[in-house]
Amino acid sequence: MRDQIFDLAARVISRSSRERPADAVLRAELKAARAFPREASADVSHCVFTYFRWLGWLNKTQPIDLQIREALRLNGRFQREPETFNDAQLLERNLPAWVSGEMGLNAELVRALQAKPRLWLRAHSNHGKPLATALGNCQPFSPDLPDALEYSGDEDLFRSPEFQAGEFEVQDISSQAVGLVCAPHKGETWWDTCAGEGGKLLHLSDLMENGGLIWASDRAEWRLRILKRRAARAKAFNYRAVIWDGGARPPTRTKFDGVLIDAPCSGVGTWGRNPHARWTTIPEDVKELAEIQSALLRHAAPAVKPGGKVIYSVCSLFRLETEHVATTFENEFSEFEPLPLSNPLSSRRAAENRLWIQPQDFDGNGMFIAAWRRAR
């Protein structure tokens, strides 16, 4: 079975490309290999992601199976003895050279991207403690956030009765911070402009106690179909899904108490979980995405009521997708005032209306959040 694991991992790696991300190829290959037991499938996933995590250290002239073995050896050593890795080597080998010109880099951040990703759960409001007891191997993020749980077990949570009953979602801790910053109230009307498959929408719905109304839009109908299934399982019914391509014409004339723009981005903040993207993302992608992000803000902001909020978030740390987009919006929309933020994951204040969450801060994804309020 070990040889079969390496063979399948090598096939996934060889078929992965900029056009075919490794995670998508992996899902397709594992679906085709139905005879593979669940434990072996997990080993294949581990081999693939470990290979891309340590790609900068490997000898590309060797056969892929030998490269995989070397990546696993490096990864094991890093887990056991991280101090044996030189900071300068980590900075040089673990990210493409162009990245340092787009964001602040330090060895602590790179070490966080090389660490084993944590698995975070979000229990329904006030149900964290009983869920932790039912699942086992759960630790609350903090006494102040008892519904955010880190799971350290090895069970397939998607098969658990609690997941099937809609008692929790798998959601990164930094993603949970976005919903907490939004802080919607029951009875309000919100717009999740880039709702995707519904991760943050379900959090907003829970915070609103399934009351009020959330408009959920996305340019891809297939994502909204997944959202519908997830919402049904989570018993979230206070939403309305609609196609929106991000253009100047909004999907409704409704005016909102809050608009969340969780924009498509380069995803550098998720490169710990998705290391293949480190080697396929290029600077032109970042520039193009920043233009899309600014357009989304420009087209969605007018739908906010006087006194309402705009929350902009990206799982990116690149200056072009964060500071530049936020500053551009402030220069174009003087009627929106910076909304001071607190970090919901700590007692630290944000830099006015801009919040940076680094991967090394809370063992989650990197995230940038900015907030404004429309003047009354």
Image (tube, grey):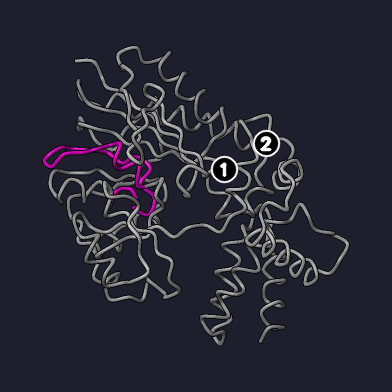
- In percent of width and height, residue 220 lies at 42, 50
- First-in-chain label (2 vs 1): 2
> Residue, x 45% and y 35% (percent of image)?
368
Disc number for residue 268: 1
Q: Secondary structure at mark 1?
A: helix
Disc number for residue 99: 2
Relative height, residue 129 to residue 176 (above, below): below
Relative height, residue 132 to residue 309 (above, below): below
> Residue, x 67% and y 65% (percent of image)?
76
- In percent of width and height, residue 297 lies at 39, 28
Left or right of 24, for residue 361:
left
Q: Secondary structure at mark 2?
A: helix
Report the label total. 2
Label 1: how many Cα within 10 Å (few below 14, some 14–19, many 20+): many
Between 290 and 354, the one nearer to me in the picture = 354
Tell me the magenta residue range. 176-201
Name the kind of residue labelled 1 in the image. Answer: Val
- In percent of width and height, residue 337 lies at 31, 16
Left or right of 275, for residue 171:
left
Name the kind of residue labelled 2 in the image. Answer: Val
> Residue, x 29% and y 38% (percent of image)?
251
* Image quadrant in which the C terminus is located: top left
Between 188 and 154, the one nearer to me in the picture = 154
Residue 129 part of the magenta segment: no
> Residue, x 32% and y 38% (percent of image)?
344
Q: Look at the numbered discs 2 and 1 and tell me whether their residues touch, using CB distance below 8 Å.
A: yes
Residue 319 lies in what quarter of the image?
Answer: top right
Residue 180 part of the magenta segment: yes
Disc number for residue 368: none
